[in-house]
Image (spheres, rainbow, N blue to C red):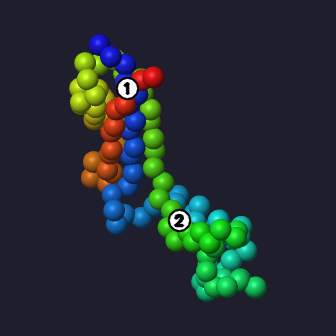
Amino acid sequence: MRRFIVTVVIENKQGLSDPEGETILRDLVLKEGRDEASGGGAGSNGSNESGNNGCRISEIKTAKMLRMTVDSRDAESAVRDVRKVCDALHLYNPIVSMVDITAEPSP
């Protein structure tokens, strides 16, 4: 048996609303002093840039991440076993969520 770090990322499927992400984006826009409707506030160049680095954030999506330490034969078995656990515990709704599970050898 080998030890693996298995990461599970659960997020909404494409096209579904993400109220938490939308709230974070709106709060970020407000914190930066930007007018969300026009894309800029007083003295702004009309973009939703954060600071002087030219970064423009137009969308934020949130996800739930779980990290597990698993003893298994190989990475594929670790992923398969963790997926079974996630399914059995109903950690996500397969109708609205997509799940990405990866395994890396533990250091």
Query: Badge 1 is on which residue?
Result: 105
Quarter of image, res 43: bottom right
Element type at mark 2: helix
What is the x, y in percent for residue 49? 63, 73
Question: Residue drawn 47% across and 59% down?
Answer: 61
Quarter of image, res 107: top left
* Amino acid beneath label 2: Glu
What is the x, y in percent for residue 54? 62, 72
* Amino acid beneath label 1: Pro
Element type at mark 1: strand
The answer to which of 87 and 68 lies nearer the viewer is 68
Closer to us: mark 2 or mark 1? 1
Q: How many marks?
A: 2
Q: CA distance from mark 2 to mark 1?
A: 35 Å
Q: In the displayed structure, would residue 10 be above or below residue 24?
A: above
Is 84 on the left or on the right of 43, as rendered?
Answer: left
Crowding at dot 1, Cα within 10 Å, few <14 / some 14-19 / many 20+, comes out as some
Name which of mark 2 and mark 1 comes first in the sequence.
2
Query: Badge 2 is on which residue?
Result: 22
Quadrant including the N terminus? top left
Question: Residue drawn 61% across and 80% down?
Answer: 47
Is 85 on the left or on the right of 59, as rendered?
Answer: left
Question: Residue drawn 38% across and 55% down?
Answer: 12
In the displayed orientation, state which residue is furthest to the top: 1
